[in-house]
Image: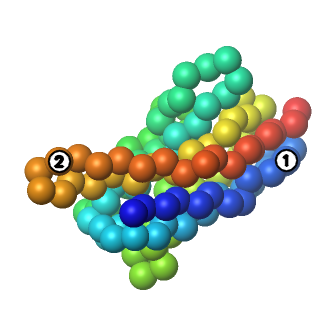
């Protein structure tokens, strides 16, 4: 059973920084694609960044150059470093883990952590 626990959210002024962490339990972390998604009030959940087991990254255009995703397989933790934050980055941020086992894709979500950026 996979469990994901996010931390590091909070209230920050525009231009500030936050670092989100997502600690995973269970197996297959090193073989997983880890991702961060966010959902603002009244909007659909959207991709922020993903990081494959091989180290390939993908970022939303809106966060390129400001956010960095990284992982520590020994700690089973994925991070999202967020710099130059903007009010439009305000959302609940969710951690996601995906892996394939026996030719079937499995996906798990954390409970989310609130990020609020004041102007």
Say which of marks 2 and 1 sits in front.
2
Quadrant assignment for the C terminus: top right
Query: In front here: 57 or 24?
Result: 24
For residue 11, which numbered disc appears in the image?
1
Is 54 located above or below residue 67 in the figure? below
Identify the image quadrant of residue 51: bottom left
Q: Give the residue displayed 54% in from the left and 67% down from the top.
A: 23
Is residue 31 rendered to the left or right of residue 68?
left
Mark 1 burial class by Cα count in 10 Å: few <14, some 14-19, many 20+: few
Tally the marks. 2
User: Residue visible at 23% across and 47% down?
Assistant: 105
Q: Position of residue 89 (x, y in %)?
A: 69, 35
51 relative position to 83: left or right: left
Residue 76: % across, % down: 45, 73
What residue do we see at 69% from left, 35% from top?
91
Q: Quadrant of the N terminus?
A: bottom left
**Residue 43 appearing in the image:** yes
Which of the two discs, 2 and 1, labels the residue nearer the N terminus?
1
Q: Secondary structure at mark 2?
A: strand
Residue 21 appears at what percent x and percent y? 60, 63
Using the image, tell me which numbered label, if any, was put on residue 74. none
Q: Which mark is residue 104?
A: 2
Query: Residue 14 appears at what percent x and percent y?
Result: 82, 40
Image height check: is 69 above or below 11? below
């Amino acid at each position: 059973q996979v469990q994901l626990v996010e931390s590091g959210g909070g209230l920050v002024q525009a231009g500030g920084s936050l670092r989100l962490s997502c600690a995973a339990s269970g197996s297959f972390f090193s073989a997983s694609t880890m991702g961060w998604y966010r959902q603002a009030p009244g909007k659909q959940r959207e991709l922020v960044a993903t990081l494959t087991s091989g180290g390939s990254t993908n970022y939303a255009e809106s966060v390129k150059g400001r956010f960095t995703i990284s992982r520590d397989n020994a700690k089973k933790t994925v991070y999202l470093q967020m710099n130059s934050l903007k009010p439009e980055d305000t959302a609940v941020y969710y951690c996601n883990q995906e892996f394939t086992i026996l030719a079937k894709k499995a996906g798990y979500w954390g409970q989310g952590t609130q990020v609020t950026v004041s102007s």
